[in-house]
Image: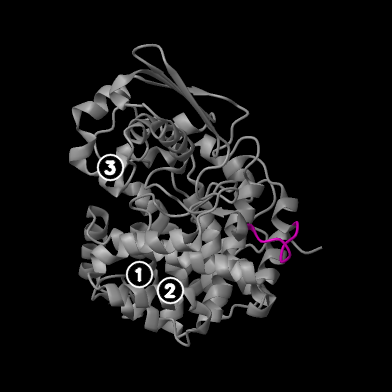
Amino acid sequence: MKSITKKLAEFAVQSTYGDLPEDVINQAKRCFIDTIGVTLAAVESPTAKVLTGLIQDLGGKEQASIIRSSIKTTVVNASLVNGAMGHVFDFDDLHNDALTHTSTVLVPAALSGGEWKRRNGEEVITSFVVGFEAVARVSMAAGKGPHQLELGWHPTSTMGRIGAAVCFGRLLGLDVLSMAASMGIAATTASGLRRVFGTMTKHFNAGKPAHDGVLAALLAHRGFSAPTDILEGDDGLCNVLARRFDGDQVLDGLGERYEILNNSFKAYPACGQTHAVIDACLDIFRKPSFRSSDIKEVICEVNPVAPEVAGKRDPRDPNEAKFSLHYCAARALMGDVSMRSFRPEEIQKEDVKKLMKCIEITTNPAFSIASAHVEVTTQDGRKAKSKIDGVKGSPSNPMTDDEMDSKFMDLALPVLKDEEKTKNILHMLRALETVKDVGNVVRLLA
């Protein structure tokens, strides 16, 4: 009987672009647009400067590009830097059931392999989709009772490696056994701790799985041996990290039902655990005769994991503010949760700090990451309530293509400083399947 790992490897190796439904292809392109937009926005961040400077010092064979840089380096190094940059603002997409920021790991792997091996758009899309299914399905299979996140792991990092190995391995043309071995190699590198949330190392948790997954595929391509059943068993990846493995979730509907369609795109540059509260607070802000200065008390009811992940009550800097339900709620009640809201000077404003002191967080075990209930009481006793069951950008309340394009332009144009060039990149990504050499897209991002 074939292992679950080998069956997943078979899917990754044998799937073709022609097998992919049109909505899956379109969703994959939305992932590339979103990820490249948030990556471009981060090129001047401290994280980008540290990592880019390090790679410049280390050197390396010129195989792939660091986005918005003249530096070409190895595919593993390029994947590391581009992956970390994509996660800097926590504005990248999220699979709510898997609890993984999948695209910020896989897009860098796909672009570095596509550029190095001169793959076309169809090949890159296919590699991305099979990698996405691997991450989402394996993370979901390891996600019940208790979830990795509750145990202190960061699933984007632990499970992202599996998808990056599959994605890059597909671009290398691995056979089934080598693909399974690449997952085995990637799995033994799996780490990434929730403890680092609110620091630059959170960004590293997205770059390192891209790096390690690419390295795993390269090693497997050269015949490096590893277990080909790494996902299952008492000492397999999922049982070690999450104490439970439901293999049926990996294989159920594989190749027929695509988890990429359940991906969410963020409307706000903050931890996904804050978004339901943000939506509810913005809804209250828009109510007639409402002023944030009149607020006496705010009760925010959220899922039990939210305060564990985003419970920084008094954030000191932008990284911490993105993981503060109190800060994000206060900002939303003041009507703006944008990139500007997370500038250092905005976090220190006295009116924001005053409002944060009025906010109390409670939990409801029946709530999901996409649910929140907020009740506001004013100084004169008036009350306003809002209940959210599907955050903006989630599958039940999706962003339109026009909204996705606007997000990309808002993030990319200030960096590229050329409207025609920015629109040209967006057009190429919207028609990615027609691109003959993905390196042409990457070169536009330099």
Q: Regarding mark 3 in the picture, which secondary structure is present there?
A: helix
Determine the main secondary structure of the stretch shown in magenta: loop
Assess whether residue 413 is covered by the magenta stretch: no
1 or 3: mark nearer the eye: 3
Q: Position of residue 173 (x, y in %)?
A: 58, 81
Q: Regarding mark 1 in the picture, which secondary structure is present there?
A: helix
Give the numbered dot on residue 111.
Answer: 2
Residues under labels 2 and 1: Cα distance? 9 Å
Q: Which residues are magenta?
A: 252-259
Identify the amino acid type marked 3.
Ser
Residues under labels 3 and 2: Cα distance? 31 Å
Answer whether labels 2 and 1 touch (C-beta < 8 Å).
Answer: yes
Residue farthest right in this picture: 1
In the rendered view, tell whether residue 154 sits above or below residue 425: above
Residue farthest front in this picture: 288
Q: Earlier in the sequence, mark 2 or mark 1?
A: 1
3 or 2: mark nearer the eye: 3
Q: Nearer the viewer, residue 426 or 57?
A: 426
